[in-house]
C-alpha cells in the first residue's frame, strides 16, 4: 500500500498476456471460466484437452473412439465468447495419434501443440500412453518436422510410494533426470514445453537444454510449498504436480526473476473444481481465474523483485507477457492492462456447477495486494 493517502499507488501497465496452460472444461462451465480469464487481461490461452470426452483428434472425422476434435473444441470456446486474440488447443496424445494425423493437422493450421499425459497421472489422463510409445511410433518425429510443440506433464507414474514423493526424489525429479534428457537427445529439433514445473531438477533440465526447450510456471508453485498444503490441510492448494519444498520454490523463483530469463513463462494450470473433496479423495487443481497476475506479482515481490521500479517491471513483463508468446510464435499483444498496488478482497467464482474457490481463498487470504484496473 502507499505510504500515505497522497502517494499514488504503484501501477504496472503491461501488454495483455497469454495463459499458456489452463483448463476450461466443457458445457456450461466454459463461459464463466473464459470470462474470468478475459477479465484478468488475457489476450490468449492454451486450453488443455483433458475434457470429457478428451480432445484427441484434429478433425471431426479422425480416429475411432469417442472424443472431440480440436476443430470442435475451438468452436465451443469461440461460441462461449471469451474474446481472445489467440487460442491454442493441444491434441491429447492417445493411442490413436499417428504421424499422419500430426502432419495433416499441422498443415491445416489447427494443430500447433500436443499434450502428453502420463497414463492415469492426473485428472482425465486415463487415455494417455507411456512416453516411450510416442518415442517409437513416429509421432514425435512428425511433430519436430512440422514445428508442433510438445506440452509435457513431466511426472513418472507407477513409482513406489516412497519414490513418488520424497525430499530427495519424487515423480517429477525422476522424469526430468531420467526421461526428459533421453527425449531431448533423441529429438533435438522438437519444441518442448515443460509444463507447470515444480522442482529444481526440472529447472536444471530446462536451463541446460537448447532454446527449443522452455517451461511454464504456476502461481502456486512460486508462492507455496508442501508445508502450506499440509498445515491445516488446505486442500485447495492440492494440485499435480504437488507443491514441493523450499529449495524447489527457490529454484523456480530464481529462474523466473533472472533478468536474462527467456525460457520460463506464465502458465497457470488453473483448474476449476466446485467440489474439491470427492468420494475418491481430493480433486487435483488450483483455480486462479481472475487472480493470476495478482498472484504472480505477489510471488515476484516475495522473491525480492521491486515492481515499482522499471527494472523489476521489465523482469515481470518478460515472464508474464513476452517469453511465452515468443516460444509459441505468437505476437505480444498491442493492447494493455494495468495492475495497481491496492488491496482487493478475494471472492469465489459463481458458476452453474457451484462456487469455485480461488487459490487465494484456499490459501487463507482475505485480500490480495494488487488489483486489476
Image (spheres, helix red, strand yellow):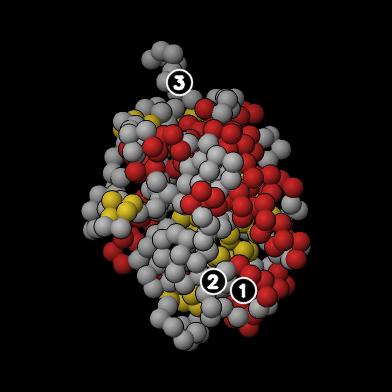
Give the distance between the C-alpha atoms of the residues marked 1 and 3, in whole angstroms: 57 Å
Residue 270 percent across, percent down from the top left: 43, 51
* Badge number at residue 35: none
Q: Which residue is mark 1?
A: 133
Q: Which residue is mark 2?
A: 129
Give the distance between the C-alpha atoms of the residues marked 1 and 2, in whole angstroms: 7 Å
Left or right of 270? Residue 109 is right
Residue at image point 48% right, 31% down: 298
User: Mark 1–mark 3 contact, CB under 8 Å?
Assistant: no
Residue 188 percent across, percent down from the top left: 76, 63
Residue at image point 37% right, 33% down: 231
For mark 1, does the 10 Å Cα neighbourhood hold few (<14), some (14 to 19), or many (20 or more) residues? some
User: Is there any visible trace of residue 179 in the rendered image?
Assistant: yes
Q: Nearer the viewer, mark 3 or mark 2?
A: 2
At numbered mark 3, what does the secondary structure look like: helix, strand or loop? loop
Residue 287 percent across, percent down from the top left: 38, 48
Q: Which quadrant: the N terminus?
A: top left
Left or right of 217? Residue 326 is right
User: Is there any visible trace of residue 47 in the rendered image?
Assistant: no
Q: Which residue is mark 3?
A: 8
Give the distance between the C-alpha atoms of the residues marked 3 and 2, in whole angstroms: 54 Å
User: Mark 1–mark 2 contact, CB under 8 Å?
Assistant: yes
Residue 296 percent across, percent down from the top left: 50, 38
> Which quadrant of the figure has residue 5?
top left
For mark 2, does the 10 Å Cα neighbourhood hold few (<14), some (14 to 19), or many (20 or more) residues? some
Seen in the picture, residue 320 relative to 109 is either above or below; the reply is: above
> Which quadrant of the figure has residue 300?
top right
At numbered mark 1, what does the secondary structure look like: helix, strand or loop? helix
Residue at image point 42% right, 31% down: 370
Q: Say which of 194 and 183 sits in front.
A: 183
Amino acid at each position: 500500500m502507499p505510504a500515505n493517502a497522497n502517494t499514488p499507488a504503484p501501477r504496472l501497465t503491461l501488454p495483455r498476456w497469454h495463459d499458456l496452460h489452463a483448463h476450461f472444461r466443457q458445457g456450461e462451465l466454459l463461459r464463466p471460466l473464459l470470462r474470468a480469464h478475459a477479465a484478468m487481461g488475457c489476450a490468449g490461452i492454451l486450453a488443455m484437452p483433458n475434457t470429457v470426452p478428451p480432445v484427441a483428434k484434429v478433425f471431426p472425422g479422425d480416429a475411432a473412439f469417442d472424443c472431440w476434435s480440436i476443430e470442435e473444441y475451438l468452436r465451443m470456446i469461440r461460441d462461449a465468447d471469451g474474446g481472445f486474440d489467440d487460442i491454442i488447443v493441444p491434441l491429447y496424445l492417445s493411442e490413436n495419434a499417428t504421424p499422419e494425423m500430426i502432419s495433416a493437422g499441422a498443415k491445416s493450421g489447427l494443430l500447433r501443440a500436443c499434450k502428453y499425459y502420463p497414463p492415469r497421472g492426473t485428472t482425465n489422463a486415463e487415455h494417455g500412453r507411456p512416453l516411450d510409445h510416442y518415442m517409437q511410433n513416429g509421432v514425435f518425429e512428425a511433430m519436430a518436422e512440422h514445428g508442433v510443440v510438445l506440452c509435457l506433464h513431466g511426472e513418472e507414474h507407477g513409482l513406489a510410494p516412497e519414490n513418488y514423493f520424497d525430499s530427495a526424489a519424487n515423480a517429477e525429479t525422476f522424469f526430468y533426470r531420467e526421461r526428459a534428457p533421453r527425449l531431448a537427445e533423441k529429438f533435438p529439433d522438437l519444441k518442448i514445453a515443460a509444463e507447470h514445473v515444480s522442482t529444481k531438477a526440472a529447472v536444471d533440465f530446462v536451463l541446460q537444454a537448447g532454446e527449443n526447450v522452455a517451461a511454464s510456471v504456476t502461481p502456486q508453485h512460486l508462492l507455496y510449498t508442501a508445508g502450506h498444503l499440509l498445515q491445516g490441510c488446505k486442500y485447495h492448494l492440492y494440485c499435480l504436480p504437488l507443491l514441493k519444498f523450499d529449495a524447489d520454490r527457490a529454484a523456480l523463483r530464481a529462474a523466473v526473476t533472472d533478468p536474462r530469463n527467456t525460457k520460463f513463462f506464465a502458465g497457470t494450470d488453473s483448474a476449476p473444481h466446485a467440489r474439491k473433496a470427492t468420494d475418491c479423495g481430493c480433486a487435483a487443481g488450483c483455480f486462479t481465474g481472475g487472480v493470476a497476475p495478482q498472484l504472480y506479482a505477489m510471488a515476484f515481490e516475495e522473491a525480492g523483485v521491486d515492481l515499482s521500479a522499471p527494472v523489476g517491471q521489465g523482469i515481470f513483463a518478460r515472464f508474464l507477457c513476452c517469453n511465452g508468446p515468443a516460444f509459441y510464435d505468437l505476437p505480444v499483444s498491442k493492447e494493455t492492462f494495468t495492475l495497481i498496488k491496492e488491496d482487493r478482497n478475494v471472492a469465489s467464482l459463481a458458476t452453474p456447477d457451484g462456487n469455485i474457490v480461488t487459490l487465494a481463498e484456499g490459501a487463507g487470504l482475505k485480500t490480495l495486494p494488487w488489483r486489476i484496473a
